[in-house]
Structures are given as structure tokens and as C-alpha cells.
Image (cartoon, coloured by chain):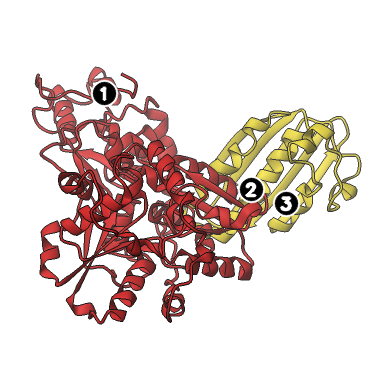
Amino acid sequence: MKHNLKYHAIKVDTKKCFGCTHCMKSCPTEAIRIRNGKAVISAERCVDCGNCLRACPVTAFYVEQDSLKQIKNYQHRVVLFPAVMIGQFPEVYSEGMIYEALFELGFTHIFEVEQPIDVLVESIKQKVAEANNKPLISSFCPAVVRLIQCKYPSLVKQIISVKAPHDLAANFAIEKLTEEGISRKETGLFYVSPCSAKMAAVKHPLGEKDSIVDGLINMNELYNRIMKVIKKSEKKDTSSARKNLSRDGIIWSLPRGEARHFSKKSMAIDGIHNVVKFLERLENGEVPELDFLDLKSCNQGCAGGILLTGNRFLTVERLQKRSKRYPFANKIEVEGTTSKLLKEKLEAEKIEPDYVFALDKDRVKSLEKMQKVEKILCQLPAIDCGGCGAPNCHALAEDMVQGKAKMTDCVFLQKRYLKENKITLERGLKNLESSWGKNRFDADCNIKGGRNEGF
Amino acid sequence: MELKFDIVGGDFNLAGRASSKIKKVLKQLGIDPKIIKRIVVAVYEAEVNVVAHSVGGRLFAQINSSEINVRVVDDGPGITNIEQAMTVGFSTASKEVREMGFGAGMGLPNIKKNTDEMTIESELEKGTSLSFTNRF
């Protein structure tokens, strides 16, 4: 995969960003630097996990989406949303009311993404049965897939090459509409994303060539729209739109939602920092024999998605309750030839490793650079303050050997150099400005940093 | 370049620190993941050996552009019968160590399997010195 082709849905609003260190410190792949007082995301390193959005004290990050207005360009308007969306609404709103609100917003067909989930379960089970190199790792969470691609290349082959539920659902929807005599040309398919990672993956799919949908909508945006039009009572019966929905589908995106199908020989890990720690151990050979790993970047799986409005634990609670009212996936007969067709479309393209953390393509040069890094580290204070615009001293040292930073970027070294008369005060200030922007250190009541949670 | 680690005997909390650090370095050097995996498994086993069986020791990793050499030295008690210790399934690990999921008698055989060269020397009451090399 070529680096310059990497698309990311997370963008920085440079008007709002005033340059602090919160996002940079929370990024699991050290992809963020502060330059000229603004956060800059490295497209090579970003895995779209959305931790920067969570950490930002001034909501300076946003997720790119398509306008909801464009649905009007299509005669038939299909909304595809993952079941977690229902979970985040307060219990006073029934799923029927939410469906009615979606019709009210102009959609003509509604599909929850995890509908024909049995096809997916069977396909994954088959892959597990055929695999010699276990555990197989779910490809469900795109942030995890990208993380493995760049940080754990030795595990890439264990990622299951099966398409994501949204893909399955899109094909399912197309199939159902065709049965009704509606052509694909007149149909607009809109996917509602719970997170930045799915947003990027659906727009520019990993392991697939083109996006299957016509537009992408942020779940928090749709939540606001629904809340504007939703009624306090049900007027129509919308249950037929949910007849292929199953218990297994509703909780698929929660922790263990996938792993539960592999009972004893599976594990589920949620939260990207937990995933990182676990993958380290897996690489060391410290993990017992397993068939399947269900890894999700957000705590509480998609219920903790960055684009959800509701509290993740309440969302899980509601989804668990909701799922109990639905039959198991293997009890649902999908009519016609649909499930056979879907199976054929499930195979995804192979995912390749992406060595973005290697210091150089040439091993001899890498080694030289690494030795330089070690030498530079002796000079740096190991306070990891972020004052240089890099997340820690080690990252700064690596930036230096790559020619992206210099010794005087370190605010503490600057002081030492000043004392030793190696640089002038003007020079030192200029350096600070190149990281933090001009006038950044003037008094300004509009700029206040964040605090730790709990304050 | 050389990396050095102290390994504390009996402290399983720190077992895996050396292998994780070495792994990170090798990844940054752009070494083939398959080779990294073999090295990491060997280093981890060696670390656990020192933690589980010895009073403590040190691990030295020498890395150049063509190979990695790892030397693990401990301060005792030494191995009575090296040939026996190299047998799959043979272990002198205590009940406590086995209950923690270690001591399956796979350590040394696993190191041998995952390295290109391996030598081990041991003197009773003095300690054990293990050295292995993997070429990139």
C-alpha cells in the first residue's frame, strides 16, 4: 500500500486548535506533532482511532462527512446504520419511533447493518477451521486493522480477510431492493458511522477497491436530526424492516459480540491501549492457544464509538436488553438466493503490512539512525513534557534523526544552551514560535488548557 | 549497538521487558517480521528461564546490520544436566512457577528451535551462560 494514498477522516479545525499537548499525548501511534501552534496528524501513522478527538479540550478535531442534503439526489434513499445507534437513545424512545423519525427525515428504506450476520459468522468459522496460523484476528475494527498493519506486521497474516458488516449490509440492501424492482442507479446508499475509523474505512476501504456506499453520515449528526423530528408515540408498524435482525447481530459490535461464537478458544479485548498491550504479548508468544481474537479500538466496542452521543455503558445496557427480544441469527431464514449471493461477496482483498515505524528503508542506515537516537536521548531531559511539539523525548529524538526537528526544539536544552552562550535569546524564542506559533505566549484569556477527568 | 537488561530472579512482573524492548528496536530497523518473531520468542523464553530458575542475571543484546547476538548470564544455581534440560517436557520448575503457567519444559528446546546458533554453558553453584544468534 502506498503511504500517500492513506485517507483519514479526522481533520483539525485550525481555527479552534490553539496548540496544547492533549491529543499528541493520547495518540497510540505518536502520529501527532504541534507545528506553528496547531496539531498536525501524520497520515502515515494515523490509525483513525479517534483518541485525539476524545482528548481535545476545545473540540478542534472533527470527522469529515457527507451532507445529509445529498440524499435528495436519489429517488430511493437507503440508510444503513449499525445497531449501536438505537442503543444510545434514552429508553423513552422505542426503536419504532426511531425508525419513524428516519422515514420522516426522508429515507425510504432502513437497514440495520448487522442483519444477515449469520452469513458472516459462518464464513469466519470456516476461515478459523481452515487456518494453520492461529489465533485469527477479526477484521471488524478498522482502527485495529491499521494498527496491526503498521505496528504488528508479523500478525497481519492472521487478520481474517472477510468484509465488514456494513459491506454485507449494503449488498443485502441492494439485493432486497432489486427484489422490489428498484435499480441500483436510482438508489442512494448512506452509511451512518459510529466512529472515525469506520468513516475512513468505508470511504476508502482497506482490502477492498471501492466504497460500496454513496454517502457517509456521522452518527452524532444523525442523532441530532432524529431528536428534532422524533415523536413520543408510534404511529406506524415498522417491524417488518427488522425481520432479519437477530440477537447476535445487535450485540456484534460490543466486546465479545464476535468472540462469543468461538466460546472457549477466543478472547475479546476493547480499548486501543489494551489492544496494544495484548498484541505485544501475542507477538512474544505469551498468549495461550486461541482460535479467534475479537479486538476493538474503543472501550465497550462500538458503544464507545467517538461519534456516539449516549454514554457507552448505558448504550451497552440498552443493546443487551434489546437483543434478548430478538431470535438467534441461525434461526432466521433469509428468503431467496440472497444469502448465497452474499457469501460470494464476502471475501476481501488481502491486507499487507505497512512498515511506517522503520527508521529507514536501508537497514544499515536504520541502525546508524538508531544509534544517533540513543546519543541524542542522553542530552534530552526525559521529562516528556511535549514542549517541543513532540509527544515525548524519544519521539523528538527520532524526529531529529529524520531531519524533522532539532536539538534547540527542546525547551530545557534551550535553557542550557542559553546559559552556555551557544544560542541567543532571540533564537530560542524563534524556535518556540516555530512549534507553538507567533504570539502564542502573549497573555490571552481565551486560551485555557484542559484538566484531568474528575475536575 | 548493545542493549543491556538486568533480570531479577523470581520477579515475573518484569519478565518480557527485554523481549519487548528488543522487538521494538528490531521493528524500527525494518527487520523481517518472521525473523523478529523467532528472536522475540527466544528472548522471552530466556528471560523467563532466568526469572523462574535463577537468583537473577543480565541480558545483553548485540545488534549489527546482519545479525543479533543475545547473551544471557545468571548467577546460579546452574544446570545439573544440560542434555536433560534440553529435552522437551523436562522441567525442574517448582509447583508455584508451574501454577503461574510457566515451567512446561519447553524453554530451552524452544530457544534452540527459534535461533540459528545456540550455545549453553553451566557450572553448578556459579551460574549459566546462554548465547544465541539470529541472522537477518
Chain on which label 3 sits: B
Determine the image quadrant of residue A102: bottom left
Q: Nearer the viewer, mark 1 or mark 3?
A: 3
Q: Nearer the viewer, residue A98 or A363?
A: A98
Q: Estimate the x, y position of residue A391 in percent, counting from the top left.
A: 33, 35
Q: Which residue is mark 3?
A: B111
The chain drawn yellow is chain what? Answer: B
Q: Which residue is mark 2?
A: A287
Chain on which label 1 sits: A
Q: Estimate the x, y position of residue A319 in percent, counting from the top left.
A: 42, 46
Element type where label 1 sits in the image: helix
Quarter of the N terminus of chain A within the rendering: bottom left
Q: Residue at x 52, y 59 (%)?
A: A328
Q: Residues within 10 Å of mark 1 (few under 14, many from 20)?
A: some
Amino acid type at mark 1: Tyr
Amino acid type at mark 3: Ile
Q: Gap in Å between the C-alphas at discs 1 and 2? A: 48 Å
Closer to the chain start, of discs 1 and 2, is 2
